[in-house]
Image (cartoon, rainbow, N blue to C red):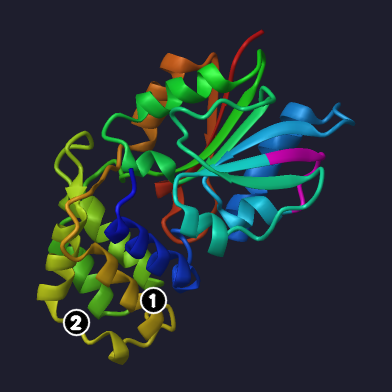
Amino acid sequence: MTTATDHSLWDERAAHFDDWGTPLRPPAEDLALYAAFVERCFVATSTPVPTLLLGVTPELASTRWPVPLRLTAIDQSEPMVRRVWPGDVADQRRALVGDWMRFAPDETPSLVLTDGAPVFFADPQVLFERVRTLLAPDGAFVVRAFCAPPQRERVDDVLADARHGAIENFHLFKWRIAMALQEQAREGVAQQRVWSVIHAADIDFEALPQPGFSARAVSTLRFYREQAGTLHFPTRQAYSRMLRESFDRVESAHAGHCGGECFSVFLARKAR
């Protein structure tokens, strides 16, 4: 059950959704990877593909897909549906408030999409198994995951890169700090700890030369303060192994933008 406090927090997050940017939101290069995977799976399809979107990522809702989709988005946060969803379009897309783990679609999806969702799961296998049970035979799952680098960075090195103008934007900086703080993916890192480390570093973000550290972007750090919720960053190789436990065929790709393989798009398929 959502409390009044939870509702207020999500309402504020939704109201400031445009303050978040890449790589937390998928850039055009990553959307192209989604589209390429979808086209490969459904190139011979002329009728709309029944599709389930976990979350209301507006970029995924609004992109021009290479094949027609009939998309239903599901999100537990009513404020996100109300404020962030780009709007229903008859016979093309709609959004509903609901729980991914309990939602019973009225049409079995042949395609499931989501962006970044595994970061909130201590055991992403729970999410992957849920998707497998939702999909039709020979269905496809396309997901972008935030992956820890093979070699864990030192927090001091990330802070130094930020001070020297070597990190493209605040959101990448925030994620690199979180990954550097994480000792084990299953344990993850508390959002409050990310806030504490960045706050204690006392970096003058206004003095940095790169435009990606705007006041609006930096202000998103406040949503981590006093938050015990954890973020989890398996490596790309670990995600591939976990997906193979639930799906028959798994592959991944990543674009050349900031962060590289730390923001990989995976295609996982069921065999009929």
State the quadrant of the N terminus: top left
Q: Position of residue 233 (x, y in %)?
A: 30, 42
Nearer to me, 97 or 187: 97
Question: Is residue 166 among the parts visible in the rendering?
Answer: no
At a point 45% along the width and 36% down the height, the residue shown is 99
Question: Is residue 235 among the parts visible in the rendering?
Answer: yes
Distance between mark 2 and mark 1 Cα atoms: 14 Å
Q: Position of residue 67 (x, y in %)?
A: 81, 39
Q: Quadrant of residue 225?
A: bottom left
Task: Name the amino acid type tagged 1.
Answer: Ala
At a point 44% along the width and 72% down the height, the residue shown is 16
Q: Position of residue 181 (x, y in %)?
A: 16, 52
Mark 1 lies on residue: 217
Q: Is residue 68 magenta?
A: yes
Give the vertical position of 69 relative to 210 (above or below). Answer: above
Q: Which residues are magenta?
A: 64-71
Tag on residue 75?
none
Describe the element under mark 2 as helix, strand or loop.
loop
Q: Residue furthest bottom?
A: 207
Task: Name the amino acid type tagged 2.
Answer: Ile
- Numbered disc in front, either 2 or 1: 1
State the quadrant of the C terminus: top right
Mark 2 lies on residue: 203
Give the vertical position of 68 relative to 131 (above or below). Answer: below
Q: Is residue 208 magenta?
A: no
**Predominant secondary structure in magenta?**
loop
Q: Position of residue 176 (x, y in %)?
A: 28, 58
